[in-house]
Amino acid sequence: MPSLGADMDEGTLVEWLVTRGAEVARGDVIAVVETAKSTIEVECFESGTVTEFLIEPGTTVAVGTPLAVIAPAGPTPAPGPPVPLPVPAEAVPAEAVPATPLVRHQAAVEGVSLQAVHGTGRGGRIRRADVAEAARSGPARVIASPLARRLAESLGVDLSTVRGTGSRGAVKADDVRAAAGTGGGKPARRGAVGEPAGPRPAATQTPAARPAGDRLAIARLMSRAKREIPHYYLSTTVDLAAALEWMHRRNSTLPVTERLVPAALLLKAVARAAREVPELNGHWREDRFVPAAGVRLGTAVSLRGGGLVAPALADVDRMPLADVMAAMKDLVLRARRGRLRASETADPTLTVTNLGDQGVESVLGVIYPPQVAMVGLGRVTDRPVAVDGMLAVHPTVTATLSADHRASDGATGARFLTALDRLLQHPEDL
Amino acid sequence: MSTTTKRASGPKRAGGSRRPSGPPADEPRPGRDHRLEVLRQMLLIRRFEERCVELYSAAEIRGFVHLYIGEEAVAVGVGQALREEDAVVSTYREHGHALARGVPSDAVMAEMFGKVTGCSRGRGGSMHLFDAERRFYGGNAIVAGGLPLAAGLALADRMRGTERVTCCFFGDGAYAEGEFHETANLAALWQLPLLLVCENNLYAMGTSLAREHAQTNLAMRAASYGMPAWTVDGMDVTAVEAVARRAADSVRSGGGPHFLEARTYRFRAHSMYDPDRYRSKDEIARWKARDPLVELEQRMRAEGILDDPATKRLEEDVTSEIDAAVRSAGAAPYEPVADLLRFVTSTTGSTR
Amino acid sequence: MNTRQSAGTAEATRTTYREALREGLREALRQDDRVFLMGEDVGRYGGCFGVSLGLLEEFGPDRIRDTPLSESAFVGAGIGAALGGMRPVVEIMTVNFSLLALDQIMNNAATLLHMSGGQLNVPIVIRMTTGAGRQLAAQHSHSLEGWYAHIPGIRVLTPATLDDARHMLAAALADPDPVLLFEHGSLYNAEGVLDGTIDAVGLDSASVRRPGTDVSVITYGGSLPKALAAAETLAEDGISAEVVDLRSLRPLDDATVLESVARTHRAVIVDEGWRSGSISAEVMARITEQSFYELDAPLRRVCSQEVPMPYARQLEEAALPQPASIVAAARKAVA
């Protein structure tokens, strides 16, 4: 099961688009998978023969679970390894908990404590599926008495770090005191009469009622964003008189199917501005900003049945406007039909959210980690503007920038918005 | 119909003997003023309840409302035999008992409206009228539930050596309850100053007397507890008053509990409205032909103590009293919700 | 518990729960001629459990009044007599029989003050025996005081000590509202020393009968001696149990219970009533409502098994809270 987005924990195989024995080439669409957010076509990354289906349609499996076996093409077909995203297990973990860095990273993203995860891999190794399973049964809940919780809060003790000695491994007040070094009271005597303290049985906990999958995924991602990313916000109102005049003039010479809409101009301008200010185009990884090689513009598309996807449009900054327009249309259509390609959901480098059609004037967005910025576009609306000392009514749009202060400073953001404004004043150059 | 004949058919000695046993012949004949007062009280009850029907229809009065119309002669007749220091314990069909006891009509009406000026501060409603000052102890909506209470009031009087009488009204339905029989036994055993007045209107809600009692001679059965027990025509207020006086006097002078069965009839439904499937129209018509108000009026006219102008004055007087009661009830405030928990206990001030 | 110490140096006297109750009655009858006792066999017989023995001779048949077997009538008569200015003390043989008078207690005694808009007080005291432990089987042994505690408008008292047996009646008679006094059948023969320095007790507060630091054992009535015995056993293990005697089930003294829980952070509630919908459930609910963040362990309960009380000794013992089951629950709480 491929990971089709940073917030994806599991997927349901909807259908196989190939038969057993079929020859497939890298990039072929071979299956349809439903995630918490949408239905996505899965490409394969190997060429060869499909020798075995490991998963039946309708089955939900964790990310990283092999779906099928593809035997490599060639004169000597060897038994095929499980192809999509095999989990390498070569790394020897330094800590007591056996898990690879990848698994550790996933656990960190999911907010799962590895201590609470039961490993099903070789030698009790924790696999990605185990982490996914632990995440699915809710965040590792610490069993603690109400008094222990209150004490932990007042003493500044993180309950998840305290070993509970109560029944079911519950953290009691004395455990918190001991952890805080404020004197544990009388643990010896209680130990003598108490039930043996066992390991904390995370797996036996009843998961709390969860919101629907997509909501939960969004909730986790957005919480992480707001928790980790120090946002700063800038905005500017761009006069669109020139751009729209140019667009209308151009549209009047074109057949209806090839006409532009303002969103295409805005998208292209954003992509160009991103290329000009590369400090905002990329990802924050392991405490540093990693600029992206190209511009992959995430475009938020609201779905008819509710929900949101943000597929990426690659290289918009280099596309002719007509192509941008066509790509946009195609993307929206397929997103709404639930047929996005896996590559289209791979990490965008910058996301644009346009709530203009929802009637709002400006959007102060939350950045999708690990991206470092989010561009918000409001409604294109007529506003009074001063032109050469005279009052005029022009179409305008308020463009906002939410940016990650770890990766950039306000001046960088200001450069971006200024570039955007400038680009839109010269639509013929877009 | 003359008073004499009514009396002859009125109270009967129970216990097998069906011999008429009216009051002594030397009893003073009621005077004109007294008759007018009796008529006024009956008329007040009748008109008050007729107004209640209107107000209920207009949703000014809610809840269960049990009308006494048709039975007024019992409450008013017995009421004449009681003194100010006596006590009355009543049922949920008690507007008549309360008004006859002198509970002010505006306090009763305000209670029906649920207002703080009501005789129970709006906490009781139609079924729970109380007036401690007039020793009117409710307003008990548990059938027969008031009987042990009345015995206790009588016990207190007996132990304190007073000459007070406690009068307890109840119906033929209550007569089937254990609490009646327990109380009758206790009261007779302890010779309590208790006047038990059974208003036999022939129906326990929808169940007729014959369908709820194996032996329908209620006075005879009461007599078996060892107390005087009489039956009286409950549609004749004069007869009721006479036998009630006799009983009350006997109770007061240490004669122990007395039982009166007043044969009466309610002209309207059990509660506000009911389909009346359990009674025939003929039966209702026959009893309405014996309307106690009409009978008293006719008798007074025949005796030359009532004429048209006097009737008109009486009607106007009663109507204006009820008008005033409705006006003041309508204008009165409701008890603030903040006072909800008052009167649950006297001391703790909380209902922990 | 509010107690009033007598001025002089009264000496401690050895007595029983039964005699203490009788002394309370005798004192009340002597001090106020509005007070009288009535009930089944309270006079010549001397009371089913001998509480009123000798009172008939001292106060005469008018004030020590034998009644017919008519619970509804004589309880109702007590209510009426209270309305009529007397201070009746009504004895019902057992709580099971009180159900025959439930209409009068619930529909009259508890409601008249409210229903009359504050006009009518009902200063009655109703005493009855409650509880099991004497092989009296399923119609003489139940603990229904928790039911009565459900009813607003009455006080529900459960004297468990000699001092309370001796002095609660006077305080109950001084209350202008109905008071139900539950005497646990297994306590009548309890012997001990009456604190001669106390000459009055309050009704509003629970009482800590044994201080402790590790777990609060909250109980009342006939279970108090069991809880104290359990505390003794626990002490041998080094567990310090605080025993709280509720004394009054309505009103419930939340403050004393919560203060105790704030000290120990753990609680076991012992209640001879059945578990479902019991007063123990009410106590637990109030602790969690008001002191959730004081709790360091789940609250625990020791109640009667949910079965009509059996006759056979071993079955009856198994059905009831016992010191051993209290000890076990307390150990779990502190584990």
Image (cartoon, coloured by chain):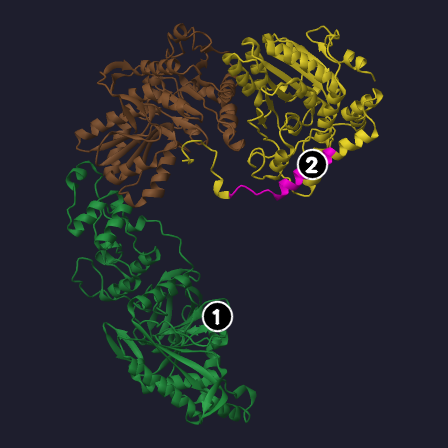
Type of residue at label 2? Ile
Regarding residue A339, the answer to whether it shows in the image is: no
Q: Is residue B325 magenta?
A: yes
Q: Which labelled disc corresponds to residue A303?
A: 1
Type of residue at label 1? Leu
Residue C4, how many percent across, how many down? 28, 25
Q: Nearer the viewer, residue A398 or C5?
A: C5
In which image quadrant can residue C227 be found? top left
Residue C306, how many percent across, how many down? 40, 28
Please identify the quadrant where the C terminus of chain B is shown.
Answer: top left
Query: Around disc 1, counting alpha carbons within 10 Å, would you say few (fewer than 14), some (14 to 19), or many (20 or more)?
Result: some
Element type where label 2 sits in the image = helix
Question: In this rendering, is residue A89 above or below A417?
Answer: above
Question: In this rendering, is residue A38 above or below A411?
Answer: above
Question: In this rendering, is residue A25 above or below C85?
Answer: below
Image mark 2: chain: B
Region in magenta? B317-336
Q: Is residue A298 magenta?
A: no
Residue marked by disc 2: B322
* Chain B visual colour: yellow
* Chain C visual colour: brown
Q: Nearer the viewer, residue B149 or B80?
A: B80
Could you tell me what secondary structure mostly forms the magenta stretch?
Answer: helix
Q: Is residue A185 left or right of residue A334?
A: left
Query: Around disc 2, counting alpha carbons within 10 Å, would you say few (fewer than 14), some (14 to 19), or many (20 or more)?
Result: many
Regarding residue C28, the answer to whether it shows in the image is: yes
In which image quadrant can residue A419 be found? bottom left
